[in-house]
Amino acid sequence: MDPSQKGIEQFRTAEYATSTPLLKDLYEYITPQYATDWKVIGTLLGLPMEEQKITERDYNKVVSCCNAMLEKWLEVDPSASWNKLLNVIQSPAVSNNQVVEKEAEAINLLSSRVAMINERAQYSVDEGTWPPDQPKEYTPLVLIQHQEWRTKEQDIEMAQLVQTGDIDSVACGQLAPIHRRRLQILQHILNTSTVTKKVAEILSPLEESNGQKFVLIEGAPGIGKSSLLKHIAFQWGQKLLLGMFKLVLLVCLRDPNIWQVKSIHDLLYLFCEGDTKATEIATACSDYLLANGGKDITFLFDGYDEFPEDLQIESLIAKILNRKLLPYCGLVVSSRPHASVNLHGRTSLKVDILGFTETEREQYIQQTLKKEPYKIKEITQYLQHHVTINGLCYVPFNMSVLLFLHKNGFSLPKNSTELCSYFICLTICRHLAKSGYPLKDTITNLSTLPEPYNKVVKQLAKLSLEALNHNKLVFTFEDIEAACPSIVTTPGGINGFGLLQAVEHFGLTGKTITFNFLHLTIQEYLAAHYIITDLQQDEELSLLCKQFWSNLHANMFFIYVTITKGQRPSFRKFLSDGDNNITISKKFLRDQLKCLRLYRCFKEAGKMKCANLLKMQKYLIKKRLG
């Protein structure tokens, strides 16, 4: 080992590793050995290319340039440390500055392209697609962040609180003294968590050099998970968030092209969108990221619950999540809670999205209906007089659908299931009218849809159920055509009367088009509709016994119970476990999570006798456990 290298090793000790280097030490130990690589080192330390060009212009000798670069680094980087510098000079890239310059240029090109993609995703609103009335401005959500994982009992407490829709209480940390039980739940959550509406706060773990840099975002259907990730991606492009990363990629995990990628190069290639130099850019960027362990990139993985289970175990995405590839990259993953259990323990922060407070609901209404102020007054009065619906509007999807119905003069709902049903009916009516086949009468119930349209919807509903049973949310045109043969021949049937959206992807083999329902809740509603209208009683009972407690089917069966008021013979037989003398089997009553799920179903269905029985049972179990 030569003397200069021997001298450098002293700065790896605990005494120096995290400290800021002194200029005299840099001049003595770094410049003599690495002066010719000063551009490479500067690039890897994050100094802009423009800054390096100025340095090169002002100084003739490489020694002077290296000293100036190191001085500038200490000036602009508040996290400058020996540890950071020594990791950089050990990079394989330091030995080949021409490659690094090429890679830096490719990273800049891809960054610009990705920023444009993110902006398009944030602001592209097409009147012919869902959601046609979404405001461009981001509306803040209530976010609860906690680093320690909750116990099963604490998760139940959280579910009970969210179920009330009383998000304002969480946001301000206050409850009326008369609600003693809810006050205890709230106090426990606030004692172990932090409540915020500031997106930057939940991203703070990504800035830690030695942390896991992994944020998991969970929330109910329609609560705003995808919108939040789109907002983060857009804000990065505007240099307002995550500025320390050269790339922030928003990756939709329901995209079949993502399922097929085998390498970092393949993944980056998808974001080049047909550029003539796509292969060259992807190769240079992947080389750069692999060389530094991914420290300059953050992935926003949207919809982990929509990512096939086998790929959660073995795929490129799984390798990134397991830190087998790009171990220093930042990770933000969104998911419905039931699907992300296998990620618990790997994350540095877990965030629950609770939705809108009253203030944000008002802001969202104002932004959406700003061109029709009289409708703002009408919907505000409606919500004041319909407490149940008002309690549902903390969920952004519900709020969007309600305003969509109101803007189009459609009937307004009494519960969440009617909300979804009316939206589906209005979408079908609007689509047929736009296609030149208007219905004689506006429908508010799928069962009243006339032929030949009813036949297509039945086929779509069957497809919805079969696909849910296999956790399939994305379809090719061949899938749609095989499952719904009438869709091609029925006037206006393409895109399922507007219930399906076509998504164009740039993949490894060129452009492809896939289809998915406007929202997963739409697919779940149609699946529930098919169970009610088309399954034989024994088939229905078999499905209930097999799948009712499945997390994957939870929202579908919630819709099913709400529509039928829990009065279907098959459901009653399932619930009583075949005993005609009781309403609910004791084996369900003994399980608090099952009680909670059934309570939510019966409360939404308006069956308060059953709901109160389950509510009492929950507290008895809680008392025994306590």
Image (cartoon, rainbow, N blue to C red):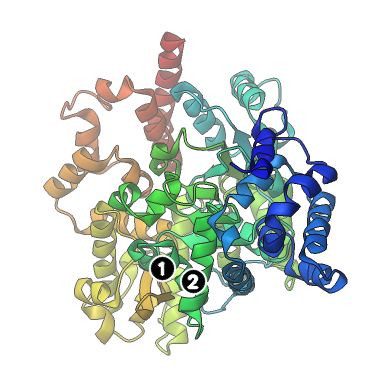
Label annotation for residue 524 = none
Pick whichever, 526 or 312, lies toward us.
Answer: 312
- Looking at the image, residue 469 sits to the left or right of residue 10; the answer is left
Q: Residues within 10 Å of mark 2 (few under 14, many from 20)?
A: many
Identity of the residue drawn at 62% across and 24% down:
192
x then y, percent, for residue 409? 58, 70
Q: Which residue is mark 1?
A: 266
Residue contact at pointers 1 and 2, CB within 8 angstroms:
yes
Amino acid type, mark 1: Asp
Report whether residue 40 is seen.
yes
Which quadrant is the N terminus positioned in?
top right
> Which amino acid does the dot numbered 2 rest on?
Ala
Is residue 135 positioned above or below 14 on the image? Answer: below
Question: Is label 2 in a helix, a strand or a loop?
Answer: helix
Residue at numbered disc 2: 282
Q: Is residue 472 left or right of residue 195?
A: left
**Viewer-side residue, 42 vs 11:** 11
Q: Earlier in the sequence, mark 1 or mark 2?
A: 1
Q: Position of residue 398 (x, y in %)?
A: 54, 55
